């Protein structure tokens, strides 16, 4: 029996926009799957797993499913922005 293809889910690249609505409350996800993390970081799966291997991102296994914390993604982006700012000021 053939499986139906899963519907494509649009991932927002802004954490403030990516929310889960439960009745009247909106909740930002604490974890994302690798595929979603790639979308958030605009990178490929190989780059993502290199970031995990290098300790730039925090993840864990939930059964057989890898989960990446959104806090570690935000921290990685903040570190990259600070490094870029420092490099930019160094060239003035």
Image (cartoon, helix red, strand yellow):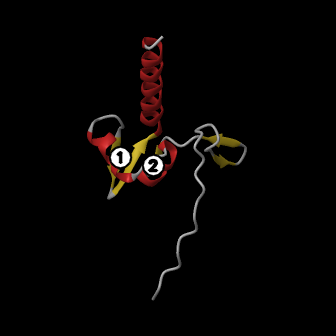
Q: Label 1, secondary structure: give it.
A: helix
Apparent side of residue 84 relative to residue 59 in the rendered image (left or right): right
Q: Residue at x 58, y 51 (%)?
A: 11
Foreground residue among 46 and 35:
46
Judge the density around disc 2: few (<14), some (14-19), many (≥20) Cα neighbours within 10 Å.
Answer: some
Q: Residue at x 40, y 44 (%)?
A: 68
Residue 24's disc is: none
Apparent side of residue 21 relative to residue 42 in the rendered image (left or right): right
User: Circle 2 is placed at which residue position?
Assistant: 38
Query: Where is residue 12 drawn, in percent x and y?
Result: 60, 47
Q: Residue at x 35, y 43 (%)?
A: 59
Label 1 near label 2: C-beta < 8 Å?
Answer: yes
Foreground residue among 32 and 23:
32
Sequence order check, earlier mark of 2 and 1: 2
Foreground residue among 29 and 77:
77
Q: Residue at x 62, y 37 (%)?
A: 16
Q: Label 2, secondary structure: give it.
A: helix
Q: Quadrant of the N terminus?
A: bottom left
Judge the density around disc 1: few (<14), some (14-19), many (≥20) Cα neighbours within 10 Å.
Answer: few
Q: Name the outermost residue toward the right.
A: 24
Above or below residue 8? Residue 86 is above
Query: Where is residue 49 drawn, in percent x and y?
Result: 32, 47
User: Circle 1 is placed at which residue position?
Assistant: 47
Please identify the quarter of the rendering in which residue 51 is found.
top left
Q: Name the outermost residue toward the bottom.
A: 1
């Amino acid at each position: 029996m053939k499986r139906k293809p899963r519907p494509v889910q649009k991932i927002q690249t802004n954490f403030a926009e990516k929310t889960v609505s439960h009745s009247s409350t909106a909740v930002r996800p604490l974890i994302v799957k690798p595929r979603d993390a790639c979308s958030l970081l605009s990178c490929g799966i190989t780059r993502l797993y290199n970031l995990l291997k290098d300790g730039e991102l925090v993840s864990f296994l939930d059964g057989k499913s890898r989960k990446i914390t959104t806090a570690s993604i935000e921290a990685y982006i903040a570190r990259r922005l600070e490094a870029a700012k420092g490099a930019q000021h160094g060239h003035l």
